[in-house]
């Protein structure tokens, strides 16, 4: 139940009795997704981490908070599907573009783009909320495909991490919608 109203004009409005249709999955609500238990952050390396917040295997999609604790080349990749990004803290960019994102900035990444994601030195860690659709194709420094990463790779990496840190591999199931 939502917080009770105090002075709002809609005080006394009753909620819809049957909000979910038969077979509908419940909402996923997670407070302060860019904070919390460090064990929930899946390491990509010593500097870069991902905290999954929503996963859809059927759509080959996920949403996460990507964090770089210090300056880093996060990844070099191509994506055939769209991606949305909202910067929570820190500073990041794609070397191939003329912008640098900081807290409050939004980026829509059109399908068919290759880029090198970098995190800058900044007093705050780079934390970006990403919604990723489809696979990422890993690229070498010349732009040649050297691997791929999709929702199934993401889930396997998160399951292994959560099992190793004592949370349990099945934690990832709580994020699926």
Image (spheres, rainbow, N blue to C red):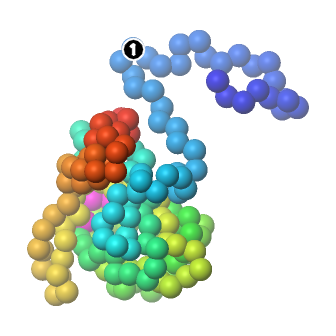
- At a point 41% along the width and 53% down the height, the residue shown is 39
Asked whether residue 93 is in view, the answer is no
Q: Which residues are magenta?
A: 79-83
Q: Split into 4 quadrants, where in the image is the N terminus?
A: top right
Residue under pointer 1: 22
* Residue for point 19% across, 86% down: 141
Q: Is residue 63 magenta?
A: no
- The image quarter containing residue 105 is bottom right
Using residue 41 as the reference point, say whether residue 140 is left or right of it.
left
Q: Which quadrant of the figure has residue 78?
A: bottom left
Vertical position of residue 116 compared to residue 39: above or below: below
Instruction: Please give left or right for residue 74 compared with residue 120 in the image.
Output: left
What residue appears at the point 38 percent right and 81 percent down from the top-left corner?
A: 72
Depth check: give the residue in front, 122 or 15: 122
Question: Horizontal and vertical percent for residue 171?
Answer: 35, 39
Picture quarter with the C terminus? top left
Describe the element under mark 1 as helix, strand or loop: loop
Identified at 34% across, 45% down, the residue is 166
121 is higher (above) or lower (below) than 74: below
User: Residue 28: image x %, image y %?
Assistant: 47, 36
| Residue 107 spot, x, y in % from top left | 46, 67
Q: Residues within 10 Å of mark 1 (few under 14, many from 20)?
A: few
Q: Main secondary structure of the magenta part?
A: loop
């Amino acid at each position: 139940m939502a917080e009770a109203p105090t002075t709002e004009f809609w005080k006394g409005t009753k909620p819809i009795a049957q909000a979910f249709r038969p077979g509908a999955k419940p909402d996923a609500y997670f407070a302060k997704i860019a904070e919390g238990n460090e064990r929930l952050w899946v390491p990509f390396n010593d500097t870069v981490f991902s905290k999954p917040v929503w996963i859809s295997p059927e759509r080959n999609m996920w949403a996460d908070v990507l964090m770089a604790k210090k300056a880093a080349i996060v990844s070099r990749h191509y994506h055939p599907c769209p991606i949305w990004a909202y910067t929570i803290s820190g500073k990041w960019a794609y070397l191939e573009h003329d912008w640098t994102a900081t807290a409050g900035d939004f980026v829509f990444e059109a399908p068919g783009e290759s880029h090198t994601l970098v995190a800058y030195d900044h007093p705050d860690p780079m934390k970006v909320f990403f919604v990723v659709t489809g696979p990422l194709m890993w690229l070498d420094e010349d732009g040649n495909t050297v691997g791929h990463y999709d929702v199934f790779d993401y889930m396997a990496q998160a399951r292994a991490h959560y099992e190793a840190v004592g949370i349990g591999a099945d934690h990832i199931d709580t994020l699926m919608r």
